[in-house]
Image (cartoon, grey):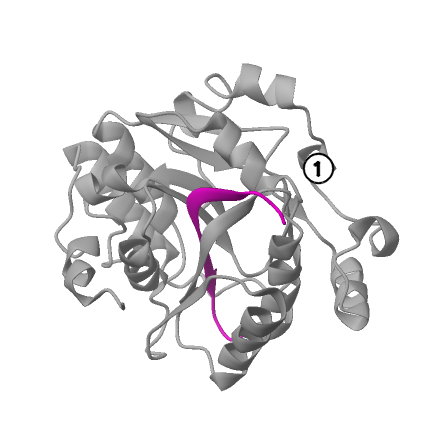
Amino acid sequence: MKPIAPCSLVISTYNWPQALDLCLQSVTRQTLMPAEIIIADDGSSSETEQLLNYYRETYALNLIHIWQPDEGFRLARIRNKALAAATFDYIIQADGDLILHPLFIADHLRLRKKGHFITGSRVMLSEFTTSRLFRHRSIDIRKYGSDNSNLLNSLRSPLLSSVLADHYKQSGRNRFYVKGCNMAFWKEDLLAINGYNEAFTEWGAEDSELAVRLIHHGIRKRFLKFGGIVFHLHHRLACRSGEKRNFEMMAETIRQKHIRIHAGIDQHLENIPV
């Protein structure tokens, strides 16, 4: 039996069970398993629930499905609901269109540190590679992938990741740089800033705005380079119509040094499923 770590893995998804299937395959192959896996589902159809039932029955995963009706892009809200439901002090966050390296959980836990949050990188899989993985229902990227990008992000070195953690992408325009698909936090820090800002109702910057408020609160960023590796399945770009508004809200958070927002995680803490 694999060792189990006292942490929660939150995976966001929306109506792409084919991708979530590969993501969950990669979860089952972790060398260190999260104690619970929470699926933050922004309104998927019943096909996703059927997939989750398969993984519960086949792999005996502690798999929790947090769902909300499909009323448009509400990623911040569903993540808050999932984070509120997390029962462990440390939370690792990923997306359902990722394949996780077998040491993804272990790498995140190796670099966790009080007073800090973590963000990482991703490898971008090509359309060709993604289609082959789907065709074979495989997560063997070495066998089916040949023309991917950001390949530096596929290299793993525990020594280099430890050396770079507090120095890489820490200042200037990179000060607030994060990838929401590859992050980790202490739950108490998320509660202190009231989680994600649910005023973000279109794609873009909700993860960076969260990072801004964490940093304003005195929580420092650690960057997980050469570790915590994830492979992003190819898909069409999301609609960018609200990107300008979102970045304006983030800029306002920076200017006003906001820490805690009103429409956040606290409104979900009393509705946690038992």
Query: What residue does disc 1 label?
Result: 154
Task: Evaluate whether residue 24 shows in this view.
Answer: yes
Image position of 215 (left or right of 266): right
Above/below status of 32 relative to 66? above
Residue 152 versus residue 156: which sits nearer the camera? 156
Please state, as top left, top right, bottom left or bottom right, where the C terminus lies in the image: bottom left
How many marks the image carries: the answer is 1
List x then y, in percent, for residue 61. 53, 62
List x then y, in percent, for residue 168. 51, 21
Dominant SS of magenta comes to: strand
Density class for disc 1 (Cα within 10 Å; few <14, some 14-19, many ≥20) is some
Q: Secondary structure at mark 1?
A: helix
- Quadrant of the rendered image containing residue 203: bottom left
Does the magenta segment cover residue 120?
A: no
Residue at horizontal 27 percent and vertical 51 percent from the top: 196
Question: Which residue in the rendered view is the most extreme toward the bottom?
Answer: 46
Task: Please provide the residue range marked out in magenta.
Answer: 1-16
List x then y, in percent, for residue 261. 15, 47
Above/below status of 54 relative to 46? above
Residue at horizontal 85 percent and vertical 56 percent from the top: 144
Task: Evaluate whether residue 201 shows in this view.
Answer: no
Residue at horizontal 39 percent and vertical 27 percent from the top: 221
